[in-house]
Structures are given as structure tokens and as C-alpha cells.
Amino acid sequence: MNGHRNRIVRVILLAAMAWSALVCNLACQGPRPAASPWATIPRGICIWKNKPFTEQDVAVVAKYSLIQTMIPDGIPWRKGTDNIALKIKKHNPRAIVIGYKNIVVHYDWHADPAIFKTHPDWFIYDSQGRPAMHNNRRPVHDLRNAAMREWWIGDVHRLLGTPGFDGILIDAITKVYFYQPIIDALSPKEHEDYTNAFHRMMRDTRARCEGRGLLIGNCLRAIHEDAGLAILRAYYDGSYLEAFEEPMRLPGRTVLPREEWVARGIDAVQQAGAEGKLIFLTLFPGQFDQNDVADVKSRSAKGEAIDFDELYADREYKIALFLICAGERSYLGYQYSRNAADDRRLWDPDYPEFHKPLGPPRGPALRNGYTYTREFEHASVYLDLREREGRITWREPEVTWREPEVTWRKPKAVPTLPGASQKQCQHPDPNRTPQSEPGAAIIAALHDPNRAP
């Protein structure tokens, strides 16, 4: 009887020792180090496809920190689309995925085209009764119509509930003020009413959709007196930017020199970033020309040789431009195409610069006229807007070895058996805050200053 009891005690003691050793080993490992938001250049991508994304597509897209794509509605005219957001999150749970909604243009690929026929009063017409059209193809929303605003806000609210999506890009805000078809169709008083209706709709959208996801506006543009900062601050969690180097030309208004246009944009992005706004700065390779883009895509589809290094020859300048104004929640978009059905090298350019260690900035950029400099931990950045020249001097991270500090603490007494030994291990600092695991609350994590890219 005593022998049986001793065997039971021996098993219990061995189990206790094994558990103690496991806990000790886990303690010795300590918390996992947090990744720096400046580890490499933070990148974003705009991407769409008229048929389901392949697993390879998803794996490639998921390496980006910010992804703007279309929200699938499961409606007849969107057959073949799928929810890429959920697939992306399986590869990269910390990715920020945002959808799309246009405030002015009624695109039939993300809004029911039948609405134009069933609700003709929701659209703008000129004094002759002709509808204002975008590119002579798509009608323009009349924001003055209360029913139209209610439909639009409700649609944004619905889209923000799509699983896997963290927010939505609200596009064409500058068009509310400066779009020629609207200017031509409306009198000055009508246009004033139109812009007032825009603000009413955005206030209602902010109130209705609060807490459902990020509202990212395409609102920062140098054409505004304050580059759009007031609109950004009033309604949006961040701004998407495009045509950053292309001054808008409007009748009766002086066209800004390109370098002044870009400098105003840089200043706006710097201010918005300092205020904690998300920035998605998309910079097109080279000078954007629709005909050139169509030609490159056509030749690529035919299997003709494309000189991709020449296509992306200005990447150092564009990266420098981004780094001069980037904040902690800024992302660079740099791609020739946004269609995942095209050659991957057109929508996912991959160069060594995107993988080099960057490190946090050592301060804001310094400006002298139209030249800028900025220091990062592992890079020095120079930018000349007049010459369209950018230089980045990369520095390899210094690798230093330091003898680890070892703190020994007497372990709690654990009964030992003859011939058995109990090891001590290094324990972590009890005052150290453990690194939390990345969770599903991507929106909350976005505002964490220690958030990994």
C-alpha cells in the first residue's frame, strides 16, 4: 500500500516539476519585441479585378499595409467579385482594408445603374434639361436632393458593415467645388447650394457611421485655399491623395507652378500627419498620360517586351517625395496599374528600396525654398521640386553586441526527488509592459503609436 502511495506522490512531483520548468522557460523568453512602424517604407495599394482574385493575388496584395479595393455587394452587375478583405486578413490580420464610394459620379460598377432611371431627380441637369455627365458616360449626383443624400448615407453605412473591411474611401470631394460639368450645369447660387448640401451630407454621414469604420476622404488638394485641411478635420479620419504633381487648370484662375503646387501639398500632408490623420499618398510612376497607360497595358497584354526599369525610373524621386512629408500613419502608393488582371509588375512593382531598413525619422523635414532634407535612422533624404530630383542615401543598421543582463531570483521551493535537479532562469522585469498580441480591432490598433506596419 505504501509503495503504491509513493508512486502516486512521485508522479505528482514529476508533473509539478515539468510544469515549473515550462513556466520558467516561457518567462525566460520574455515578451516578443514590437515591430517598428518605420521598419521599411510603409506601402499601400489600390487594386481591383473583375473576376475572383487568385490565391497568389491575395498573397501579394496582403503584403501591403493599406489596401483600397472594391466592396463586393453580391448584386447582379457585380457577379464574379469576391470579398478579398477576408482573404487578406488571413495572411495579414493587421492590414487595413478600405472600400470605395464616389460622392459625385454614379459609377455603375459600385452603385445600381437602374437608379438613374428610377430616380432621375437625384441627378444634375443643365438649363436645357440635359444631364451633367462624367466623361460623357456617367451621371452626376445632385447632393441638394434630400432623398438622394439619404440613399447615399445609407449605402455608406451598409458598406461599412461588410466583413473584413475597416473603412471606406469617399472619392471626388474636390469635384464638388471644381468639376467643370457641375460648374457648367449650375448657376453660381445653385452651385453654392450644392456645396452647402455636401457639408450637410458629410455631417450626417459622420454622425450615422460613427464607430463603424474609417472614413477616408479624397480631400487634400492644393487647389483649395487651405489645401482641404478644414474639410479633412471636420469629417474624415484621413485623406487619400492623387494627382499630387498635376496642377488643376480652371477657367479664370491662375495655374500654380508645379513646384508651388507640390509644396502646398507637402505642407498639407505634413500638417495632417502631425494631427494623427491617416495619409494614403499615391504617386504615379513618371508623368500620368491616359494614352501612354493604355499603350503600355496593350503591349503588355500582347506579350511585348516592357522596360519596367524605365517605367519606374523615377522611383527614388517619388519615394523621397513621400518620405519628406510622411507621418506615422502615412502610406505610399506607387504602381502603374490598379487592375490585378494586368501583368503583376504593373501593379506590384518590387524594388530593393522597398525592403531596406528605414528606421524612425529624427525630426521633421527641413525646407529651403523648394528643396527639402530629412533624416531617418537609416536614410538621408534630399528632394528638389524644381529639378524633380530625389536622392536617398541608405545606411546599413549598426549591429552591436551587448552582454545581456542576467538577474537571478531564488525560485519557489518545489519538492525534488533524489537525483533530480531544478534549474533557475532569468525572469523579466516585473515593471515591463508586455507586448499585446495583434487582435481583430484593426481600427483601434491604427491609433496605437507603437503599431506595426
Image (cartoon, helix red, strand yellow):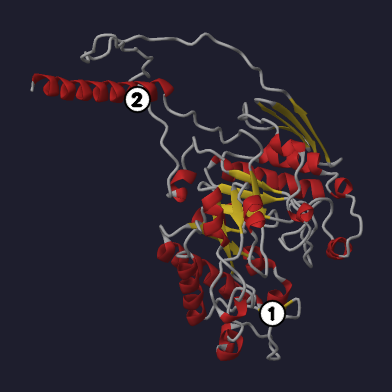
Reply above or below: 433 against 51.
Answer: above
Residue 45 % position (x, y): 66, 53
Q: Can you give x and y, in whole percent of width and height, for residue 146 in the image?
A: 48, 80
Q: Which residue reaches farthest left?
A: 1
Amino acid type at mark 2? Leu
Query: What is the C-alpha distance between the residues marked 1 and 2?
Result: 65 Å
Q: Which residue is mark 1?
A: 138
Residue 92 x, y percent position in the rendering = 54, 47
The answer to whether residue 17 of the structure is visible from this angle is: yes
Image: 56 above or below 39? below
Q: Quadrant of the C terminus?
A: top right
Tell me residue 197's x, y (percent).
53, 72
| Residue 228 visible in image | no
Find numbered disc 1 in the image and state the secondary structure of the residue it sits on.
Answer: strand
Residue 178: quarter of image: bottom right
* Quarter of the rendering containing residue 248: bottom right
> Which residue is rendered at x = 58% and y = 59% of the image?
217
Residue displayed at 80% across by 43% down: 315
Q: Is residue 401 above or below residue 212?
A: above
Q: Amino acid at mark 1?
A: Arg
| Residue highlighted by disc 2 | 22
Nearest the eye: 282 or 304: 304
Using a 10 Å C-alpha cutoff, classify the residue at mark 2 as few (fewer than 14 neighbours), some (14 to 19) or many (20 or more).
few
**Which residue is more in the foreground, 123 or 402?**
402
**Dot 1 alpha-carbon crowd within 10 angstroms: few under 14, some 14 to 19, many 20 or more:** some
Task: Choose the circle earlier in sequence order: 1 or 2.
Answer: 2
Q: Foreground mark, 1 or 2?
A: 2
Front position in the image: 43 or 239: 43
Where's the N terminus, which quadrant? top left
